[in-house]
Amino acid sequence: MIWRAAFLWLTSVAVAQAADCQNVAFDGDNFSVCTVDMTRENLRLFLYDDAGDPFSQFSRIDAHLNQSGDKLGFAMNAGMYHEDRAPVGHYVEDGVEKMRVIPNAGPGNFGLLPNGILCLREGRADVFETLRFQREAPACQHATQSGPMLVIDGALHPRFLADGTSRYIRNGVGTSADGKTAMFVISNGAINFYKFASFFRDHLKLPQALFLDGNVSRLHAPDLKRSDFGRRLGPIIGTVVPDK
């Protein structure tokens, strides 16, 4: 019994330490899901390099991290941006605010209220609906605003329709109630908002989830032998790991 307990403990440790990106089928659609344990992993945002130029691609962030002996683990585009790669909404990197909160409705998906903000703090990640974020004013080390919200306190965004005809490859993020887990998802085919949000609520069982973008969605997941390349990106979120 002692040997068996020791074996199970070692197995659980190995699983916990392994990168957790996997492909998942749900209700006739396929998704890639990367799970980040905020108590163990270094998750952060990237936008500009040391010269002030947008990183734009996963490979440039990886090369930047290599200079200090690290590398990019999982990564994903992290919110909407203007033509010059500047974020549309609230953006904080390393504790420095680079763009204020935008609380009002507006054109496009970003302005389809309620929208929200992903806030990274020591040991936790939380998706906040924007007005709640303003009320609570959490001190985020990293933050990015996007929209619309996908799941709000366990409910789907009220504007989503099951038979919605707007279908794109989409990516988003959901967080657990205790803030210890962040789950990043990209659909592997065109999908509407209702189906995408339902995956977060009904399969991943997450109480809060935020749409990050569609059509331009990209994923870097070495475990899946995948690193998407295409249109230049604005904000990017990813884990930093030692380059062993």
Image: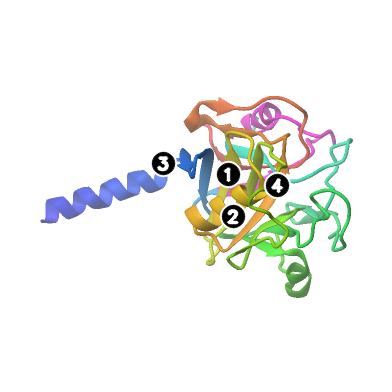
Question: Is 32 rendered above or below residue 104?
Answer: above
Q: Which stretch did the figure color magenta? A: 42-66
Task: Name the residue tied to disc 4.
Answer: 212
Determine contact: label 1, label 2, CB under 8 Å.
yes
| Distance between mark 2 and mark 4 Cα atoms | 10 Å
Left or right of 141 on screen, residue 23: left
How many residues crowd around disc 4 within 10 Å: few (fewer than 14), some, or many (20 or more)? many
Q: Quadrant of residue 220?
A: top right
| Distance between mark 3 and mark 2 Cα atoms | 20 Å
Q: Foreground: 13 or 208?
A: 208
Which of disc 4 and disc 2 is earlier in sequence?
2
Q: Quadrant of residue 149?
A: bottom right
Residue 185 circle label: 1
| Distance between mark 1 and mark 2 Cα atoms | 8 Å
Give, as a three-letter code, the residue at label 1: Val
Task: Name the residue tied to disc 2.
Answer: 174
Q: Residue at x 69, y 47 (%)?
A: 164
Which of disc 1 and disc 3 is earlier in sequence?
3
Query: Of helix, strand and loop, which one carries label 4?
Result: strand
Which of disc 2 and disc 1 is earlier in sequence?
2
Residue furthest front in the image: 163
| Distance between mark 4 and mark 1 Cα atoms | 10 Å
Task: Name the residue tied to disc 3.
Answer: 18
